[in-house]
Structures are given as C-alpha cells and as structure tokens.
Image (cartoon, rainbow, N blue to C red):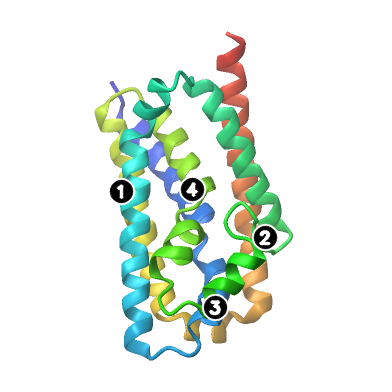
Amino acid sequence: MSTFADQLSLFLVSLSAVFFVVDPIGVVPLFLAMTHKDPPEKVRSMALRACLVGCGLLCFFALFGGIVFKLMGVTLSAFRVAGGILLLITALDMLRARTSETRTSPGEAEEGATKDDIAIVPLAVPLLAGPGAIATVMVLMSKGDGVLSGVPVVISILITFIVSYFLLRAAVLVQRVLRQSGVAILQRVMGLILAAIAVQFIAEGTRALMR
C-alpha cells in the first residue's frame, strides 16, 4: 500500500512531467499567431474548449490506456521505454527552444493559422495533448501499484490544464512579459528537467524488460 510520502513523490514527479510536456508557455506564441485576427471572446472560448478536450483526453488515456495496450499485447515495460524515448525527443527539441515535430509540423501550424476554429485541432490535439503527453501520463500511471496511485497523476493533469487555460487566456500579456527570449529560456530549463524524467522512464523500463 502506498504511503503518503510515495503519493507526494509521485504527485511532484507527475506534475512536473505533465506540465513540462504539455508546455503551455511554449504554445503561447503559436496560439497568438493562430488567433491574432479573432476577437477576445472567441479567443477565450477556444482556449477553454481546447483545455477541456486536452484534459479529458489525457485523463482518458491515464485511466484506460493501460487496458488498451494489454489487449494489444504490449507490456508496460516496453511502453515505458518507448514513452521515455518519445519524451526525450520532445525534451531535446525544448532544449533547442523549438516546437517538437512530435507535437506539430510547420505545415500543421500554417493550416491552423488559416482555420476559423483551432480549439480542437491543432490546439487541443496535438499541441496540448500530443503523443508525448499521452505517453507520459500512461507511463506515470504504470508506476503506481493501486487505484489510489492514479490520483496524483489525474490531479496533476487537472492542475496543468487549469494553469494552461489562464496562460492562453492571457497569452498577449504572457508574451509581452516574457518576450521570445524569456519563453526560450523557460523552455530550455523545462526541457532539461523533462530529459532527466525521460531517462528515468527508459532506465526503469529497460530494467524491467531485462528481468
């Protein structure tokens, strides 16, 4: 049975991993570029719907993703290694202060700029809840050993998307305060921490596979 210390440790790891891989600060410049012609009310509405959909998607995969992979015959150890590699690629792109192509490609970003409503695609998926984020929450859920062990992961997802909504809602102010250089610095710091978490995922998965 998990102790309070174990739950707290999982919560801290989960919150940092989920927030950094969702990376709402890094999404702010793209969000501004895609919504610069839209009225404030529409921008707020799209931010809210994107965060609700992204949050729901990650919660779904956190709670039921493991069942899907068991039905497909994929072990959690193998998925930990695969998820860690995907997370590491995302982290390396963040260290270079650029948008990872595992989340969106330049073509998808250009298409988003011409769309009338970007809330679901590409904002919710794949910018906020992309493959890296989905893999991360599933790996985090596999670290626990009971029903209650999933609570810190779900809470981390909820907190991440609440913060994401307010950051996107105030995207103009965030960009003005941080500027491009500030966003790049924060992305590099978050990328470094995310890389360490990714290496831990890979190491744990590899150790389990070898056993």
Locate residue 198, reporting x and y percent: 60, 39
Which residue is identified by label 3? 113
Kind of residue indicated by mark 1: Ile
Q: What is the distance, in whole Å, between disc 2 and disc 4 at their CAs?
A: 18 Å
Name the element at disc 2: helix
Mark 3 crowd level (few <14, some 14–19, many ≥20, 10 Å Cα): many
Residue 13 visible in the snapshot: no
Q: Nearer the viewer, residue 14 or 104?
A: 104
| Gap between marks 1 and 4 measured at Cα | 15 Å
SS of the residue at dot 1? Answer: helix
Mark 4–mark 3 Cα distance, whole angstroms, equals 23 Å
The amino acid at mark 3 is Ala
Cα–Cα span, label 3 and label 2: 26 Å
Mark 1 vs mark 4: which is more N-terminal?
A: 4
Name which of mark 1 and mark 2 comes first in the sequence: 1
Q: To which residue does mark 4 refer?
A: 133
Query: Mark 3 touching mark 2, by CB under 8 A?
Result: no
Q: Is residue 71 above or below residue 59?
A: above
x and y percentages locating residue 81 in the rendered image: 59, 28
The CA distance from mark 1 to mark 3 is: 32 Å
